[in-house]
Image (spheres, rainbow, N blue to C red):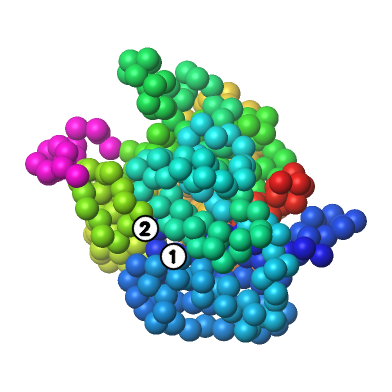
Amino acid sequence: MSLVLSVNAGSSSLKISLYETQVDSREPVQLVLTSSISNISAPPAKFSFKVVEGTSKDEEPPSIHDHASAFEHFIECLGHEADIDRARITHVCHRVVHGGDYTDPVLINDEAYKHIERLSDLAPLHNGASLAVIKACLSQLPDAKSIAFFDTAFHRSIPVHISSYAIDQKIAKHRGLKKYGFHGLSYSFILRSFCISAPGASACCIEHGQSLDTSMGLTPLNGLPGATRSGAIDPSLIFHYTNKAGRMSHDKGAAVHLHVTQAEHILNTQAGWKALAGTTDFGAITAKRADEPAARLAFELFTDRVLNYVGSYHLKLGGAVDALVFSGGIGERSKELRALVAERVGCLGYTHMDEERNGAVDATEGVVVDIGAPGSSTKRLLVCRTDEQLEMARQCTLGSL
């Protein structure tokens, strides 16, 4: 059987999964091994490599200093640690955060590469990293088809009155200034797992299997605050925050050259929980919130923003909601956040949260975990473990790309 590689590049990380295609099976692909590399921009990088039901390896290779060298180290380990011939890899799936007007996966050629490159300024934390890995992949695996899967594609169904901004529409259309939305691969995976309509705490409103609205906009900066991103703010705030807002930023750590201002750099990399509580670890923030005012502010601010979107999207769906889905890193791991949100949304007709079920999510197997009261027929509370790499491999295999 052929092998499919799924690559997910973050601003300072790289997650890779290798799958084997299946014939006459419910699942089109089967996981062979996984690898993750973190701290790429702040060496020493941490490298992990695990073969399913086989060997595992954790190390801090001095050779990893950027995304390209991280991918090259992974390819070397394929042969050394797993005895896998790289020639068996027929397809490589790349998660690309911003695809602009690309609404379907595309085979990466010179035109597609330049298109992604032009959009890097709109997703400075991710598109540049993806391009660096794509370039390394084309060099290391020249015979494999490299395919870009865009987070923005899932949201192509958002109605124009929701995706538009109140600005001159001639300029907006000429420059592609509209709400694109992101995290689309995760939402697609959730839909495949549930087959229901649901507004998620990760801030996407899905109706009849299509994106109706989402919190992020032209760039991933809008919406909920993140580890280093501000989330939605008054647009004028940054000009009062610094008198250098309009100057160009020169980030030497960026994977590609970016044309972003100081304002964009600050709001993308020096805001969020890091600015509020001094850490990007939401688990640490949660643990310290009872004793540290800064941690409490970060936790309560994030919860407030989540509730804003849940309430708004519930109204957009006319109350016809099947479930509230918690997903992503925080949604899957923070039982405290889930408990507080579940308590507040009870007025909307959701089932009561089962404390025992909620506390046991980490120890519960399966993609979907029900944390609502047993036997309840009201709107459900669910946790979904998303897998963007698997979603790309599925689409690649089923779509015969």
Give the answer, above or below, for where 381 lies relative to 137.
Answer: above
**Position in image of residue 242 (x %, y %):** 12, 44
- 240 vs 390, left or right, is left
Q: Earlier in the sequence, mark 2 or mark 1?
A: 1
**Position in image of residue 118 (x %, y %):** 40, 40
Q: Quadrant of the N terminus?
A: bottom right
Between 9 and 293, the residue placed more toward the observer is 9
Q: CA distance from mark 2 to mark 1?
A: 8 Å
The reply to whether the magenta stretch includes residue 259 is no
Q: Residue at x 56, y 59 (%)?
A: 138
The secondary structure type at the circle numbered 2 is loop
Which label sits on residue 104? none
Displayed quadrant of residue 52: bottom right
Which label sits on residue 67? 1
Magenta-tinted stretch: 233-248
Displayed quadrant of residue 195: top right
**Position in image of residue 201 (x %, y %):** 51, 45
- What type of secondary structure mainly makes up the magenta span? loop
For label 2, the residue is 255
